[in-house]
Image: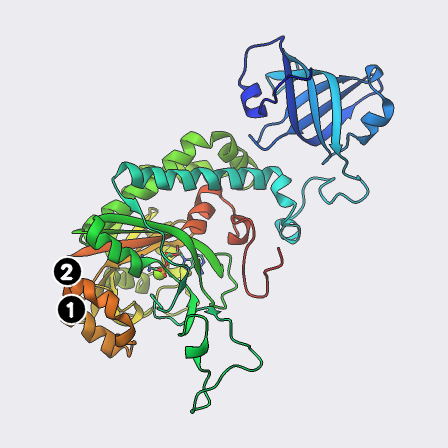
Amino acid sequence: MKDLKRTRIKELLQSEDFDRKVLIKGWIRTKRGNKNIAFIAVNDGSTINNIQAVVDVHSFDEELLKKATTGASLEISGTLAQSSGQGQSVEIQADNIFIYGEADPETYPLQKKGHSMEFLREIAHLRFRTNTFGAVFRIRHALTFAIHKYFHEKGFFNIHSPIITSSDAEGAGEMFRVTTLDPVNPPLNEKKEVDFSEDFFARPTNLTVSGQLEAELGALALGGVYTFGPTFRAENSNTPRHLAEFWMIEPEVAFNDINDNMDLAEEFLKYLIKYALENCKDDIEFLNKMVDKELLNTLNHVNESVFIRLGYTEAIEILEKADQKFEFPVKWGIDLQSEHERYLVEKHFKKPVILSDYPKDIKAFYMKQNDDGKTVRAMDVLFPRIGEIIGGSQREEIMEKLLGRIREMNLPEKDLWWFLDTRRYGSVVHSGFGLGFERLMLFVTGMSNIRDVIPFPRTPRNAEF
Ligand code: 4AD
Ligand code: MG
C-alpha cells in the first residue's frame, strides 16, 4: 500500500465509493471492543465526526494494539465499507496500522472526557483535541473566511492597519506601551521624565486599540475598506466578554451616513450567521447538543429578525420604567452596562437592537456631533447573550467641529495632524464600525466565556501559552 494517498476523514464520511483501499491519518479518540474485534474511532480534525476502524484483533501484533490508546497518533489503511453500526455510514476494515506517537494513558490529560472549561483553559495547548474546541476553531476559520468573502464581494478593500502606533484612537488611555528602553535605567530629560526621543521610534508608541483612524484614511480614497486585525486593550476587566488581545473587523465607508452604517452592520451580521449555519452545520449541531440547547433557535431567530433601531434617550426611558432592579442605576448620561443592554434585547424587544445617538461625553472624539449639542451619531449593535457586539458611528467630517471636540477633550491636536488632513482636503460624510470577532464567536458557538473562543486568550495575569 506504499503509494496509497491519505484521504481526509471528512471526505471519506461522505463517500459512497465502497470496497476500495483507503488510508487515513489522525488521532485515536476511543478504542473499545473485545478479544476478537476492536473498534478504533479516529479523528483527523477535518470534521467533528470520527471514522471507525474495525480491527480483527488476531491479525495484528498484540503489542501494537496495546499502544493504540486515546490520544495516540496513527495511520490506518484498509477497505472502505458501508457501516452496519449505528450513527455512522462508513467504516474502515483495517489491514495495516502504524502508530506514530503514543499517548501514555497514565498521564495523557485528555484520557477521559467531560473536563470543565476551566480545566481545559489550563491545558490550552491540548484543548484543540477535544470535540468542543475542534468545533469552535473550525467555526472561527469559517467566519474569518466569510468576513473576507463578504467584503470582497461588496467591493471593499482590506487594509492592513499598523499594530504599533503612536495614537490612541479611542482616547481611553488603555494601551500597552511598546518600547526598547531599559526599564531599570531609562534615559531621562531635564524634567526627569522618560526621554522617549531615545526610544526605538523616537516617540512613545503602543499596541493599537483600533485600526479605525487608518481605515478612515483608506476609505477617503478607496471608497469602502475594512481592517481585520488584532487589537489590544490594557483594561483590567475580568469578565466573560473582555480580552486584552482581541480581533476586530472595522469597515469604513465614504459617503455612508449613520443609516447606511446600520444597514451595513445588520446585513453583515446576518450574512455571517447564515454562512455559519450553512457551512458549519455539524459543528453547530454538536454545540447545540453539548453547549447551549438554544443555540440553533437563537441563531435562526436573530437571522429572521428585523433589528430594532432606537435612540439612546428612548432606551433610557424604557430602562427607567423597567420592572427590574439594576446593579448600576439608570439615568440619562450613563454608559450602558451589559445588564441594561441585555434587558433591552432579551426582555423588552426580544430582538437585536441598534442603539444610536449617545451622549457625547461617553463617546470618542471622532463621532459626528448632532445639532442638539449633547449627543453624537454613535451606534452600538446589541445582541442577545452578548450585549454590545458592534460599536460604530458616523464620523465628524467638518474640520472646525472635529477640532473643537479635540480641544474640549484635551487631545494631542499636534499629533493628529495627519488625521485632520482628511478633513482639510476633500472631506466627505463617512461612517464605520467595529465588530468584536470573539463576541461574534461567542454568539455563533454558544460558548459562554470569551477565553474559550480564541486559541490562546490574553487576560489580566494570563499569557502563559
Ligand atoms: O466599541 P469599540 O471600542 O469601538 C472601536 O474601537 C471603534 N474604533 C470601532 C469603529 O468604529 N471602527 O470596540 C468595537 C467592538 C465592541 O463592540 C466589542 O464587540 C469589541 O470591539 N470589543 C472587545 N472585544 C473583546 N474584548 C474587549 N476588551 C473588547 N473591547 C471591545
Ligand atoms: Mg463600544
Expressed as whole percent of the image width and height from the top left, the position of residue 48 reads 57, 31
Which residue is situated farthest in the bottom direction here?
Answer: 190
- Image quarter (top left, top right, bottom left or bottom right) of the N terminus: top right
Image quarter where ligand 1 lies: bottom left
Residue occupying the point 55% across, 65% down: 460
Residue 152 numbered mark, or none: none
Dot 2 crowding, Cα within 10 Å, few <14, some 14–19, many 20+: some
Judge from the rendering whether residue 159 lies leftward or rightward of residue 11; answer left or right. left
Circle 2 residue: 427
> Which residue is located at x 25 percent, y 40 percent?
155
Callout 1: 10 Å neighbours few (<14), some, many (20+)? some
Circle 2: residue type: Ser
Residue 291 at least partly seen: yes
Label 2's element? loop
Indicate left or right for 218 with 179 as reference: left
Whole-angstrom CA distance, mark 1 to mark 2, is 8 Å
Within 8 Å: ligand 1 and the Cβ of disc 1? no
The number of numbered badges drawn on the structure is 2
Quarter where residue 115 is shown: top right
For the residue pair 372 and 151, the one nearer the viewer reads as: 151
- Front residue (pair 13, 341): 13
Q: Quadrant of the C terminus?
A: bottom right
- Seen at 49% across and 61% down, the residue is 244
**Residue type highlighted by circle 1:** Met
Picture layout, residue 354 above or below residue 132:
below
Answer left or right for 145 relative to 411. right
Residue 399: numbered disc: 1
- Do the residues bearing badges 1 and 2 touch, measured as CB atoms within 8 Å? yes
